[in-house]
Amino acid sequence: MASIKYEQLMAAIPGGNVDPLDPVDVVRDKMHAIHPNSASPGTVVESADLDGIDAKWIYTSENADSDRIVMHVHGGAFVSTIIDHYLDYGEHLSRHMEAKVVCFQWTWADEAPYPQAMLDTMTAYRALLAQGIHADRIVLVGDSCGGGIALSAIAALRDAGDPLPAGLVGLTPWLDAEQTGDAAINPRGNDPFVTAAWIRARYKDYAGPNGDLKDPGISPFHTKLAGLPPMYMSVGQIDTTSDDSTRLALRASKEGVSVVVDVAAEMVHGFVGLCGAFPEATEAMQRAAHWVKQRVK
């Protein structure tokens, strides 16, 4: 049974957030309205430039000297949110993963569709390497659509022969543009943050008018997995996208890639980002952090 704090928060969330017919500007307004934009006093937030990509370092004071780097590929349904919406998220990532977090701004799809957000991610990652940070000290953490962007970027880096990060953490990641998993076809509960139809609409925004939703770069559920670093996926049972990760893990095992999937009972999409608001989110963040700290000691 879900916690009282979780049930109270879900009851307080207004409906109507995920209409697949909404134009991009309406999607953006709705997304911005439900995202926080501050961190706790004492959390360090420093502006940075990653080869032309706007970014911010976010870390708690006790992790100021950490050489464990979390590169946060934020969500936003491909068309919304900015770094400042993820300061609280970055704070929790830093505290639990005992790391310095860098969050960067990928390009919204209506400004430049696929592959721009993926290319931005690759540029930001390569900029970290150019600063002398070793690839084996970096973990990419992607939440929501950022999880799919991160996976596509790592696959492209592999194909280009770049040094790969120590791992990828997907926090309720979007991986299947067509939403063909059982959780999408047969919803397991009411999720105020996503529906299969809304996700497909946002993927069409990302793909652009001539994009193919089966393109592995757009829909990394279809990408070749061999040669990729280990992955950890945290999903909610009710989340429409949960089977993106469970099905990916099954295929990954056949291609020699380790993918751990943590399914949290009764949880919705994006629940890990609400770390600190209810126990299930904090516990899921702690489990993901344990995996990260085992990968980058």
Image (cartoon, rainbow, N blue to C red):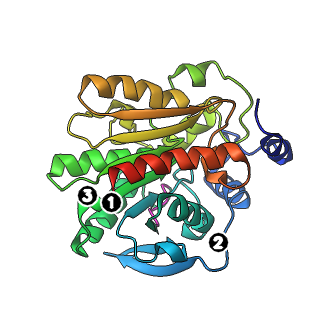
- Reading the image, the residue beneath label 1 is 138
The answer to whether marks 2 and 3 mark residues whose Cβ atoms lie closer than 8 Å is: no
Number of marks in the rendered image: 3
Question: In terms of image quadrants, where is residue 6?
Answer: top right
The amino acid pointed to by label 1 is Ile
Under circle 2, the secondary element is: loop
Report how far apart the C-alphas of labels 1 and 3 lie in the structure: 6 Å
**First of labels 2, 3 by sequence position:** 2
The span picked out in magenta is: 104-109
Q: Secondary structure at mark 3?
A: helix
Q: Is residue 105 magenta?
A: yes
Name the one closer to the observer, 208 or 267: 267
Does the rendering let one see residue 150? no
Q: Are marks 1 and 3 in contact (CB under 8 Å)?
A: yes
Where residue 39 is drawn, which disc sits there?
Answer: 2
**What residue does disc 3 label?**
136
Task: Tell which of 114 and 189 is nearer to you.
Answer: 189
- Circle nearer the viewer, 2 or 3: 3
Quadrant containing the N terminus in the rendered view: top right
Q: Residue at image x 29%, y 52%? A: 166
**Res. 236 visible in picture:** yes
Label 1 Cα neighbours within 10 Å, binned few <14 / some 14-19 / many ≥20: many
Residue at 41% in and 61% down: 70
- Classify 53 as above or below 9: below
